[in-house]
């Protein structure tokens, strides 16, 4: 398998660029993409920060990343185009031909909704929930656990982020997630920031050998990917879930769709969007 970092750059949540980009990459066998999403790149300053990050990846890996972009603003797009990556922009590819065909200049408005979408409650629920998931990802940012429908808990690389985003996009569920760190595991207690929200917690676990494989692909030869570290984290997290009576799912052989469906059923969460 050929590994390649793929950057999804967007002035909104990045969901569109991810969906379209992944659909294209799926046509190429033997490519193992490592996804990096860069949402809310709405200003030239944001774009310059994104370019620094992309260039850092290129230097570290010795191969330029593939960049899928849905940037509407011309000035922002021009900055990102200068990054050391293979740049593909969906709006750039399709807006100009549409302008020629329709004989109308496009609005070039960031985040413009599709016809009727802004008044569609299902669309609004998805957008609100997606923004919530991004703002409350990996225990950082807002930490608006009061506003969460569910808080996913687990060690690093147990599908917390993709599950949170899937719950948001498919069902309008506001999902936060919290990564259990070495410090959390050493205390053998529920992290203080989560103690008031025990009823919202749902654990994710994974078999150690699969977790080691995932981490080894991400950081080969590191302590983070060592068998001893992985086994310790999985064992200690499971003990914490059992001690605190936190329901959990083994995600080793589960798709994100299955993980999300089981969480909805086990937590009895009302779907705000029906698919």
Image (cartoon, rainbow, N blue to C red):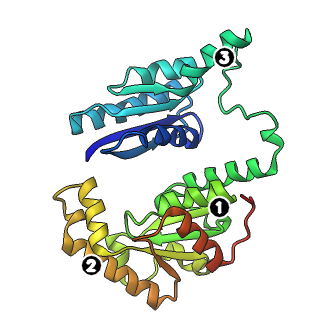
Q: Relative to 76, is 83 on the left or the right?
A: left
Point 52% across, 54% down: residue: 141
Query: x and y percent of residue 3 in the render?
Result: 28, 44
Relative to 55, does residue 73 appear above or below in the rendering?
above
Q: Nearer the viewer, mark 3 or mark 2?
A: 3
Q: Relative to 76, is 232 on the left or the right?
A: left
Q: Relative to 252, is 275 on the left or the right?
A: right
Point 33% across, 73% down: residue: 183
Residue beneath disc 2: 232
- Mark 2 burial class by Cα count in 10 Å: few <14, some 14-19, many 20+: few
Can the viewer see residue 142 in this picture? no
Residue beneath disc 3: 98
Number of marks in the image? Answer: 3
Frontmost residue, 1 versus 142: 1
Query: x and y percent of residue 96 in the render?
Result: 61, 14
Residue beneath disc 1: 174
């Amino acid at each position: 398998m050929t590994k390649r970092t793929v950057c999804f750059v967007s002035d909104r949540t990045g969901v569109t660029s991810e969906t379209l980009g992944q659909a294209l990459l799926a046509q190429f066998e033997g490519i193992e993409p490592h996804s990096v999403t860069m949402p809310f790149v709405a200003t030239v300053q944001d774009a310059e920060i994104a370019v620094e990050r992309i260039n850092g990846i290129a230097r570290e890996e010795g191969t330029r990343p593939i960049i899928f972009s849905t940037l509407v603003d011309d000035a922002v797009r021009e900055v990102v185009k200068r990054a050391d990556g293979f740049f593909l922009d969906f709006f750039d590819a399709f807006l100009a031909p549409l302008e020629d065909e329709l004989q109308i200049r496009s609005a070039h408005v960031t985040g413009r909704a599709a016809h009727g979408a802004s008044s569609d409650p299902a669309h609004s629920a998805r957008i609100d929930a997606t923004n919530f998931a991004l703002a409350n990802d990996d225990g950082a940012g807002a930490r608006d656990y009061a506003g969460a429908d569910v808080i996913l808990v687990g060690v690093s690389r147990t599908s917390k982020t993709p599950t949170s985003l899937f719950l948001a996009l498919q069902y309008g569920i506001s999902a936060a997630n919290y990564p259990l760190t070495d410090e959390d595991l050493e205390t053998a207690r529920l992290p203080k920031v989560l103690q008031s929200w025990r009823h919202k917690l749902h654990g994710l676990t994974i078999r150690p050998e699969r977790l080691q494989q995932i981490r080894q692909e991400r950081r080969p030869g590191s302590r983070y990917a060592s068998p001893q570290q992985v086994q310790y984290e999985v064992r200690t997290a499971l003990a914490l879930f059992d001690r605190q009576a936190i329901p959990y799912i083994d995600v080793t052989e589960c798709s994100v769709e299955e993980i999300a469906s089981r969480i909805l059923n086990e937590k009895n969460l009302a779907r705000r969007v029906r698919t």
